[in-house]
């Protein structure tokens, strides 16, 4: 099998895994509180073992990160950090976390800025290098070392989460129950999924300890290992959940948190998924309105009928994939994924429109290319573990569904986002995580009632198709922090090079000066 632990492209795609995460569940599902899930009673000997982890000094050595063509060169160094697989048993099995650091350009260094691109399965190492390239002239890179890490189970960290072979991914291995009615998991298949993920990832113990609360503990070990008394952090999409959970678990260790494109900590899994579907449909309608200005628009010149026009083009692919030049064909799911991937930024809409026009002419190459870019597929058919890791991590983070609840979610999703509806009856959908060896460990709501927390900065785009603006408002309120509202059509802002956003983020990170109440930027 080809080497699979290669990061997928991170710019503009990190939060698409919210749509594709395998494990979704109802409000009120079984959860475990933060204290019950992870803290536990620590013996004196266990505390001494943890002290050894906190006392690490990572041995950074020069490394060569992969960057997009044309990006400025970045001088980086890499290392590995050891952490307990189970913090309740720190003397037991260990995990290793891959690190990448780009040192501050100036002499008046503040400390480290730890980064997370989202996912939850997207690696942060190459993302840190990409961020350093984009921020090459930013005052942030003058004052901070940029540090990216691949969360446990992700990318180059070990043990790595791995559920499918590349050949299985090529054949359309399931990563989500959506869309139901096309190729639904059976009870036997969900049990097989657990067994296969465990076998390929290093055992059920690994599957039980890759949730966000585990990663937040790793991040505190990383903070200490980097020599920072308090954490400075910037996370996008899922990275806002990680940052918020860190704030809940280690409030007095926070110096500054930038939370971009926020997960709503108040919304349970069902509510948040439906909010996402609503946002995706609204974005599709705006894409269709943009297309309708062209006489040759493949969705027609009436945006109100665009959903029906799209359904007419993609639903036949369930039975007969569209031809592609590489002979793989374009399926219904892949066509929807391709269009969805383009919704992350308005600048990608023309590629989706051209892909839909190709599909109207009987060819699927354009949409398949968009889909492949999201999955991180290589030219030889290799896949990174990003989406498999996201699926597995979500099994610990999201509320667990019964078949009845999963079926209800699919029906609600299609009602909210009919452009994704395959038009088949939803009889019984199943949560891919229903057979997981442990209960979810995150808990909802999270990051509420925190005392002693420094001011945080949530950045939220008004027409974000993946994480609705309401979620950003709710996260800022839950943390008692500041909110920067950004008018625009995009998921996430940190790498947009928008001067208004960049100046506000730099002022907050460097001088701890938050935007005024009601502050707004425009993309």
Image: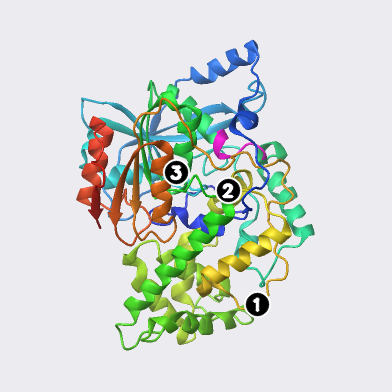
* Disc number lying in front (2 or 1): 1
Q: Is residue 210 magenta?
A: yes
Q: Position of residue 329 (x, y in %)?
A: 56, 76
Its colouring scheme is rainbow
Marks 2 and 1, how far apart in space?
A: 29 Å
Secondary element type, mark 1: loop
| Quadrant assignment for the C terminus | bottom left
Outermost residue on the right side: it is: 188
Question: Which residue corresponds to mark 1?
Answer: 424
Outermost residue on the top side: it is: 44
Going 38% across and 20% down the picture, which residue do you hit?
229
* Disc number lying in front (3 or 2): 3
Residue span colored magenta = 208-214
Label 1 vs 3, first from the N-terminus: 3
Label 2 vs 1, first from the N-terminus: 2
Question: Which residue corresponds to mark 2?
Answer: 389
Residue 278 placement, left or right of 92: left
Q: Residues within 10 Å of mark 2 (few under 14, many from 20)?
A: many
Secondary element type, mark 2: helix
Q: Position of residue 172 (x, y in %)?
A: 62, 66
Residue 291 placement, left or right of 269: left
Marks 1 and 3, how far apart in space?
A: 35 Å
Secondary element type, mark 3: helix
Going 38% across and 24% down the picture, which residue do you hit?
230
Q: Position of residue 167 (x, y in %)?
A: 63, 61
Question: Which residue corresponds to mark 3?
Answer: 239
């Amino acid at each position: 099998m080809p080497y699979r632990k290669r990061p997928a492209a991170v710019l503009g795609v990190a939060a698409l895994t919210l749509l594709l995460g395998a494990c979704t569940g109802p409000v009120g599902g079984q959860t475990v509180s933060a204290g019950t899930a992870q803290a536990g009673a620590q013996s004196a000997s266990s505390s001494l073992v943890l002290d050894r982890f906190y006392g690490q000094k990572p041995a950074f050595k020069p490394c060569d990160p992969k960057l997009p063509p044309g990006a400025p060169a970045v001088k980086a160094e890499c290392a590995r950090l050891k952490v307990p697989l189970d913090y309740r048993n720190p003397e037991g099995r260990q995990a290793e976390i891959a690190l990448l650091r780009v040192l501050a350009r100036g002499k008046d260094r503040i400390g480290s800025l730890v980064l997370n691109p989202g996912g939850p399965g997207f690696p942060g190492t190459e993302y840190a290098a990409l961020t350093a390239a984009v921020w090459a002239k930013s005052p942030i890179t003058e004052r901070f070392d940029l540090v990216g890490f691949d969360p446990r189970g992700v990318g180059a960290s070990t043990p790595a989460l791995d559920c499918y072979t590349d050949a299985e991914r090529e054949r359309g291995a399931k990563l989500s129950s959506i869309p139901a009615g096309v190729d639904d998991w059976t009870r036997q298949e969900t049990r097989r999924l657990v067994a296969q993920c465990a076998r390929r990832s290093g055992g059920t113990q690994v599957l039980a300890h890759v949730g966000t609360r585990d990663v937040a503990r790793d991040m505190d070990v990383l903070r200490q290992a980097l020599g920072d008394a308090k954490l400075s952090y910037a996370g996008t999409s899922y990275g806002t959940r990680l940052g918020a959970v860190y704030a809940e678990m280690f409030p007095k260790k926070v110096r500054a948190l930038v939370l971009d494109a926020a997960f709503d900590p108040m919304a349970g899994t069902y509510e948040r998924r439906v909010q996402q579907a609503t946002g995706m449909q609204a974005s599709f309608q705006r894409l269709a309105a943009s297309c309708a200005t062209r006489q040759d628009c493949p969705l027609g010149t009436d945006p109100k009928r665009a959903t029906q026009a799209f359904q007419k083009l993609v639903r036949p692919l369930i039975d007969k994939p569209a031809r592609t030049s590489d002979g793989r064909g374009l399926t219904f799911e892949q066509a929807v994924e391709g269009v969805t991937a383009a919704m992350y930024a308005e600048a990608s809409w023309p590629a989706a429109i051209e892909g839909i026009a190709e599909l109207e002419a009987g060819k699927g190459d354009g949409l398949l290319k968009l889909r492949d870019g999201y999955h991180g597929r290589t030219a030889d058919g290799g896949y990174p573990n990003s989406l498999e890791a996201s699926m597995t991590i979500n099994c610990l983070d999201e509320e667990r569904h019964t078949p009845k609840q999963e079926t209800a979610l699919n029906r609600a999703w299609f009602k909210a986002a009919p452009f994704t509806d395959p038009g088949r009856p939803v009889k019984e959908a199943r949560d891919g995580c229903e057979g997981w060896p442990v209960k979810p460990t995150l808990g909802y709501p999270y990051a509420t009632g925190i005392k002693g927390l420094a001011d945080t900065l949530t950045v939220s785009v008004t027409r974000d198709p993946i994480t609705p603006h309401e979620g950003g408002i709710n996260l800022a309120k839950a943390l008692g922090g500041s909110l920067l509202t950004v008018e625009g059509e995009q998921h996430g802002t940190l790498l947009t090079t928008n001067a208004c956003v960049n100046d506000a983020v730099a002022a907050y990170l460097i001088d701890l000066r938050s935007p005024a109440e009601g502050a707004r930027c425009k993309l």
